[in-house]
């Protein structure tokens, strides 16, 4: 028995088996390493996705912060406009408290008033965020009418743009004012005898008495001044050889009044008995074929209308016909700011900023001075001061409402959206840290497993070499 030969054979077989095992282990190690590479690839892919989401969030956060700055700039400018209008209000109140306004004071006051109005226009024209003008009406919905007797009253913020040809406007009935026409002329004899007249409008009652020696023109002028002094929206004039004609300033069936005269027929049919004036009518018509609600001269589209909600037009024509007639058309252009809700709330929010120029504020206020907007107010008479106060009150309400709308939009939509985005960003960062810790722990566990396998192999090999040495010692 060749022990050496047997030992060599044993060693050779063992070494061959060990090399095979090592090769299998290496292949196993290689598979494991490939798996690690595959897992690492998967992890890199996840990290790339997380990185992409983080980049998107960072970009969206920057956009929303920019939008917040834009809206806050507009709100700050609106605060300044409110301050200017308050100063105009105080100026007008000062002149309204004076009984007689001297010419010099009027000139000084008009210069101050002009300066305040110019400052309002300056703020409206120069308020910007970047290159965008915010308060000159650029970023709001606008409309253009095509028709001699049509004008825009208001447009809803959410109305959509119209076709290029616009929406046709059809009228069936024009608006009128309530009025009373006397059947007996107010002649000089009645004037000299002290004709008495009563006018009631709402809760106000006014008594007027003619004076001996005054002619009809002077009498009617004094009558009109008394009506204005008591803020009664009634106009008085003479027609057909001295017959009186009283008309309400405002159009429509809602505005009514009554009158009486001491002589039957001058105003009322019975002496001293107040009779109601002939009522006014509201305009009747449609826009784009949709029946609208008429109030006075104003046509208002239905709030349920998808295309026209918020649109109001004025028809101030006096045409009467048995058949409806085309009064013109209106074209709408929507250019309000659009704010995207982003990834978390994928919806669009619209914010329109109307023009804050003086010519676009304080409109739609009936007044005896004929002021059509804030830009035209004055203090040259007590009537102008009174009417100017009403227009300033309307303008102040418009500016305040817009400021409140802007601040509410900023808080409810932009700032809340920004808060949600930042919270999502923070959560994503925490999740990424936890994910990285888990990946490192799995890698460490796999490395430990490999190390244990290799250590076990070396221990087995050492034991195999030790057994032949024991056999040789026994043979000796």
Image (cartoon, grey):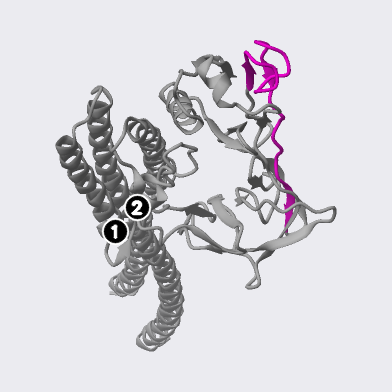
Look at the image and say whether residue 276 sits in the magenta stretch.
Answer: yes
- State the residue in front, 316 or 290: 316
- State the residue in front, 295 or 217: 217
Work out which quarter of the rendered image holds the C terminus and state it: bottom left
Q: Residue at x 66, y 32 (%)?
A: 178
- In the picture shown, does residue 120 fall above or below 169? above
State the predominant SS element of the stretch in magenta.
loop
Q: Secondary structure at mark 1?
A: helix
- Residue farthest toward the top in the current orientation of the protein: 272
In which image quadrant can residue 332 be found?
Answer: bottom right
- In the picture shown, does residue 104 fall above or below 35? above
Residue 426: x and y in percent read 34, 49
- In the picture shown, does residue 185 fall above or below 377? above
Residue 421: x and y in percent read 39, 50
| Residue 168 in view, yes or no | no
Mark 2: few, some, or many residues within 10 Å (few <14, many ≥20)? many
| Residue 122 in view, yes or no | yes
Q: How many marks?
A: 2
Q: For this view, does 444 lie left or right of residue 362?
A: left
Residue 166: x and y in percent read 65, 67
Specify start and end residues of the magenta stretch as a single range. 258-287
Q: Secondary structure at mark 2?
A: loop
Residue 356: x and y in percent read 36, 50
Q: Which mark is residue 125?
A: 1
Query: Badges 2 and 1: C-beta atoms under 8 Å apart?
Result: yes
- State the residue in front, 49 or 316: 316
- Residue farthest toward the right in the current orientation of the protein: 322
Q: Earlier in the sequence, mark 2 or mark 1?
A: 1
Q: Residue at x 51, y 18 (%)?
A: 192
Instruction: Find disc 2 in the rendering and name its residue.
Output: 357
Q: For this view, does 195 lie left or right of residue 133?
A: right
- State the residue in front, 53 or 370: 370
């Amino acid at each position: 028995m060749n022990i050496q030969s047997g030992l060599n054979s044993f060693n050779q077989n063992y070494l061959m088996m060990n090399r095979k095992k090592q090769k299998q282990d290496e292949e196993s190690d290689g598979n494991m390493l490939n798996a690690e590479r595959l897992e690492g690839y998967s992890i890199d892919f996840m990290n790339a996705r997380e990185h992409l989401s983080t980049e998107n969030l960072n970009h969206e956060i920057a956009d929303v912060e920019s939008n917040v700055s834009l809206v806050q700039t507009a709100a700050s400018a609106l605060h300044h406009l409110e301050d200017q209008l308050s100063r105009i209000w105080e100026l007008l109140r000062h002149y309204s408290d004076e009984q007689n306004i001297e010419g010099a004071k009027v000139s000084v006051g008009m210069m101050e008033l002009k300066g305040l109005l110019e400052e309002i226009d300056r703020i409206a024209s120069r308020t910007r965020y970047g290159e965008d003008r915010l308060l000159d009406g650029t970023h709001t919905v606008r409309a253009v009418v095509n028709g001699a007797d049509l004008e825009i009253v208001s447009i809803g913020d959410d109305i959509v743009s119209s076709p290029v040809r616009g929406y046709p406007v059809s009228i069936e009935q024009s608006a009128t004012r309530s009025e009373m026409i006397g059947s007996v002329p107010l002649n000089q004899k009645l004037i000299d005898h002290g004709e008495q007249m009563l006018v009631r409008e709402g809760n106000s009652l006014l008594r007027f008495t003619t004076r001996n020696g005054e002619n009809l023109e002077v009498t009617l002028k004094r009558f009109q001044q008394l009506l204005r002094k008591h803020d009664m929206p009634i106009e008085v004039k003479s027609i057909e050889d001295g017959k009186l004609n009283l008309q309400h300033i405002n159009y429509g069936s809602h505005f009514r009044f009554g009158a009486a005269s001491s002589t039957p027929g001058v105003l009322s049919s019975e002496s001293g008995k107040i009779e109601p004036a002939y009522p006014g009518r509201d305009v009747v018509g449609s826009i784009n074929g949709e029946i609208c609600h008429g109030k006075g001269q104003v046509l208002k589209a239905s709030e349920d209308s998808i295309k026209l909600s918020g649109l109001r037009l004025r028809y101030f024509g006096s045409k009467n016909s048995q058949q409806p007639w085309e009064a013109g058309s209106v074209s709408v252009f929507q250019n309000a700011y659009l704010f995207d809700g982003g990834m978390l709330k994928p919806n669009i929010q619209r914010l329109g900023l109307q023009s804050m120029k003086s010519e676009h504020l304080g409109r739609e206020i009936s007044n005896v001075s004929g002021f059509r907007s804030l830009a035209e107010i004055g203090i040259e008479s007590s009537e102008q001061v009174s009417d100017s106060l009403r227009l300033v009150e309307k303008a102040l309400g418009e500016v305040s409402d817009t400021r409140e709308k802007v601040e509410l939009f900023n808080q409810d939509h932009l700032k809340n959206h920004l808060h949600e985005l930042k919270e999502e960003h923070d959560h994503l960062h925490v999740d990424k840290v936890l994910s990285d810790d888990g990946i490192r722990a799995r890698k460490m566990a796999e490395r430990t497993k490999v190390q244990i396998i290799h250590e076990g192999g070396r221990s087995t090999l050492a034991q195999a070499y030790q057994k032949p040495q024991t056999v040789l010692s026994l043979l000796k």
